[in-house]
Amino acid sequence: MLQSINLGVMLLDSDCRVVFWNDFMAIHSGKDSEAVLGRLLFELFPELPQRWIQKKIDGVFALQNLAFTSWQQRPHLFNFSGSRPVTGQAELMYQNCTFSPVMEAAGCVKYVCLTISDTSEVATQQLELEHLNRLLQAEKSEQARLIRKLEDAQAQLLQSEKMAAIGQLAAGVAHEINNPVGYVYSNFSSLEGYVADLFKLIEAYRAAAAEQPDGAFHARLEQANQALEYDYLRDDMADLVRESRQGLERVKQIVQDLRDFSHIDSGDWQMVDLHKGLDSTLNVIWNEIKFKAEVVKNYAELPLVQCLGSQLNQVFMNLLINAAHAIDRQGYIWLETGVRDDWVFVRVRDDGSGIAPEHLTRLFEPFFTTKPVGQGTGLGLSVSYSIVAKHHGRLEVASELGKGTTFTVWLPQRQPEKDAKSA
Ligand SMILES: Nc1ncnc2c1ncn2[C@@H]1O[C@H](COP(=O)(O)OP(=O)(O)OP(=O)(O)O)[C@@H](O)[C@H]1O
Ligand SMILES: [Mg+2]
């Protein structure tokens, strides 16, 4: 039975000499019994890890315990070729080995029986499964990454649509106000002229009345003048008209800024004066900034830039509001523009809280915010980044904690032909 069993079986004495050797061993090692009996194991198989096996065998002699090694730990202890090559090529046999004591008398080990079982089939199947599993895992994490990317893209899209909708609303309101303000303003100019004429007329009546000899007539006139406070009314009227005209001019300016800010008349690529966009944006968000910061402008001579004006204004708006938010009490925001070769830049610098170095790399991630819930969604910079990227530009940041932050938007003056048409 031992000879013909489908397991390698050999007996070793305490010197590691072979005293028994079955057919399985003979077939797979190519050495038959006669050639190996009485010879040292490590002479027959110089490839064996001698120290490791010796330790196992010594352990079995000393402790009379079974020792075991599986194919996962030592896949090919003996250099036997596999009985079932999966790929058609001869492969090394995977083996489980057992070192068991063969007792001579109770408590006395005479031999160590080494059995070797061929686990190639199980091993190759398991290895194949592990390989497939790894592939699946990789695919799964790739899918998770794509889903995250998709979610981010969707969030950005929503935010930019929201901002575009606000822009359109502003532009719509501005457009509606523009008409009535237009005719109130023009009527007002006429009214101003008429009022001046009316006063001239009254003065003429007064002068004519002064030439009348009738005292009672004078007294009646004077009484009416005093009762109606004519002198005060005449002076105040001039002030009222002047102030109202200033008010109207401001309304007109705000309406114009709203229109410029949202660029409703130009949904596509246009040659834009960035300073106009910056100024109108500043005016629109002035309420958020004026109590926090003094804005210092340092504008260079800029060429017209081919861009999507309303979208760039969203970028400027977010950078300016971020700067204002970073200022705790009272500070400065420097707004600088300039030209380098074919590029223009718009720089927003503040002397606010600055950004911690570990946050710098995460700024442009969607939903990254350090602001309390309800104050920031963390989408401003990620949307700004995409808008600048759409313009083939760059958005750079430099910051020092406690000192302040500088954001620089770099834009090429012209867009590549096909992009400018398709957008
Ligand atoms: N000028 C700045 N100074 C200091 N920190 C800044 C500045 N600009 C941005 N940050 C930091 O970057 C974070 C992300 O900015 P981002 O504009 O993307 O989102 P948010 O301002 O928090 O929210 P949202 O703009 O969506 O309302 C901010 O929460 C803030 O911590
Ligand atoms: Mg922001």
Image (spheres, grey):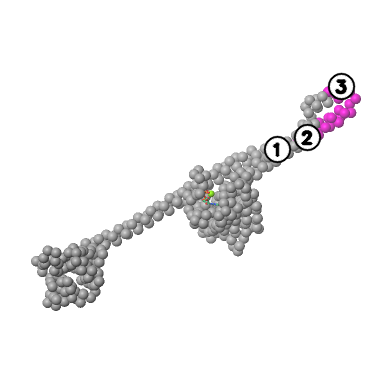
Q: Which residue in the rendered view is the most extreme toward the top? A: 216
The percent position of residue 142, horizontal first and vertical second, equals 37, 56
Res. 411 image quadrant: bottom right
**Residue 227 badge:** none
The answer to whether 256 appears left or right of 372 in the picture is right
Residue 295 visible, this angle: yes
Instruction: Please name the residue shown 84% across and 32% down the image.
Output: 204
Is residue 374 located in the magenta-colored stretch of the structure? no
Residue position marked by numbered label 3 in the rendering: 216
Depth check, front residue: 279 or 26: 26
Q: Which residues are magenta?
A: 194-220
Secondary structure under tag 2 reads helix
Residue 96 visible, this angle: no
Number of disc labels: 3
Depth check, front residue: 81 or 246: 81
Is residue 219 located in the magenta-colored stretch of the structure? yes
- C-beta proximity under 8 Å, tags 1 and 3: no
The percent position of residue 230, horizontal first and vertical second, equals 79, 29
Instruction: Please name the residue shown 16% across and 76% down the image.
Output: 39
In the displayed structure, 395 sits above or below 83; it is above
| Marks 1 and 3, the one that precedes in the sequence | 3
Residue position marked by numbered label 1 in the rendering: 244
Whole-number angstrom distance, CA of label 2 to CA of label 1: 15 Å
Residue position marked by numbered label 2 in the rendering: 235
In the displayed structure, 189 sits above or below 402; it is above
